[in-house]
Amino acid sequence: MHAQAIEPALSIVTNIDLALATGNMHRIRRLHITINYLYDPYPGLFHIHAYLHNVSCHWQRVHTLELAVRGNHALTRTEPIGSIEQYGQIVHTTRALAQLVPHVKDLRLGGLCPSTLAHVVYATVVREHGARIKRLRSNYALLECNDIALDSLTHLDVGFGSVRECQIPSILATTLVSLSLSSIPLDFEWLPFADPNNPIISFSSLRALSVSYRSVRHNESLLMPARPCTLRFPMIEYLHVMAPSTWYPIIACSEFPLKTRNMHIDGAIALIQQLNIEQLPRIGHLSLNLICDDSHDMNTALDAISDICRRASHTSTVRLEVFNTSDITVTSTCSFITEVDIKAPVAAGTVLAIIRTMPKLVRLELAGILCSPQHPIFPLTLPTISHIRTLSIIQHACEPARLHHSNNNYSQDSCVAFVQFLLLHLPYLSVLNTRQISDIPIRTFVRMQVLEYPRFANIELNLK
């Protein structure tokens, strides 16, 4: 890659210079162009076009075009098209540039802070290559492209960011093999994939689907699409859904096959609790990344996780992030959870309950342990053999003082004693991370017990 400044407010990063310098233009399969501009991308587009045009016969083998047009962050939100003449110059030059690489099948549109002018460039490139494109990836919505048909597209990956206009070209649902849509609103319209004469959209060739919904603000209602439709995914093998709100439209409005190979769900635990489990396909490989807070009962959450996991032949990572600030009571057993991250200090007894009720747990992260100096007694053994390999106790610097003045429920000595107890009773532990807990007593304990417990020699201690 080579960067050069064409004028003070413009720079270009591209691999064209290297190809020209080494005489390998005819071997280039991937062309990378990044234009950073302050006010006007036209000089950069003109410069790139001149570079390519001088040896135009040598770019016939380019199949992948990576294009990023980056405007100034402070100006892109309100940046207008300066004039009809400027608009025409950008469209004309971009079209001429695209025609110099006529066999592009993989189009990747990147960069940050998309501007009005950048959208004009991207729409023009998509329009020129639309009939041939097999793969299209864009970091943001493709504005001014809703009148373009991409009938040969097999792979689509679009991130919409925060823009309300989630526009993309018209696409044949039946040709897609892979589809990824990021940061879409709950009322996202699937019209670009729809046949106007059929309320059912069938993605008959789709194997991989990834959909993430944007967060709903507190003052927003959960909107339904103005024109709801039924989505069919008869061949789906991989499904990834991320929804931080309270429901999954993609699941509620879709028909799936009886079985699917992989499923990953990322979101609030309430989503799992509200799912119609019977509506889901039988799952070959399931992974979950779920969030639980004060609005959810911990044991009900664990039961919901068990219900969905039973639909899977195999579960890999089942991660639970807990934001409860009140006391947590764990009584339900969940033999599927592999990772737990608790974002608030918890009682030592709760930690033992988690270990007891989650036998497949391999990673446990805690934001502190509450150990009463009056009752620092722990059981002689754990009732089950724990498989925890990584234990992290990140006590924030302010926690000891704050907890000490809150019902006197924090004791540094008791906390150290509890860590030592866990070291003795977690036979598979390989990594111990602690912060704001006295490290000298823990290191001394490990050193003195290593002859009786040889596995201590293999534990990685990260004590700060």
Image: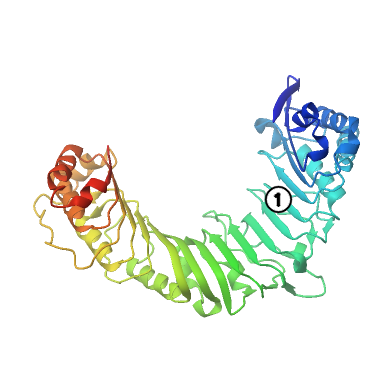
Q: Quadrant of residue 153?
A: bottom right
Q: How many marks?
A: 1
In the rendered image, which quarter contains the C terminus? top left
Q: In this view of the protein, can residue 277 be seen by the observer? A: yes
* Residue 42 located left or right of residue 384: right
* Residue 308 located left or right of residue 5: left
Residue lying farthest to the top in this orientation: 8
In the rendered image, which quarter contains the N terminus? top right
x then y, percent, for residue 100:
88, 40
> Three-letter amino acid code at disc 1?
Arg
* Residue 151 located left or right of residue 297: right
* Residue 124 located left or right of residue 257: right
Find disc 1 in the rendering and name its residue: 137
Q: Quadrant of residue 306?
A: bottom left
x then y, percent, for residue 141:
71, 50
For the residue pair 49 and 160, the one nearer the viewer reads as 49
* Mark 1, other Cα within 10 Å: few <14 / some 14–19 / many ≥20: some
SS at mark 1 in the image = strand
Q: In this view of the protein, can residue 370 be seen by the observer? A: no
Q: Residue at x 61, y 60 (%)?
A: 211
x then y, percent, for residue 410:
17, 47
x then y, percent, for residue 437:
22, 41
Q: Residue at x 86, y 43 (%)?
A: 60
For the residue pair 89 and 99, the one nearer the viewer reads as 99
Q: Residue at x 70, y 26 (%)?
A: 3
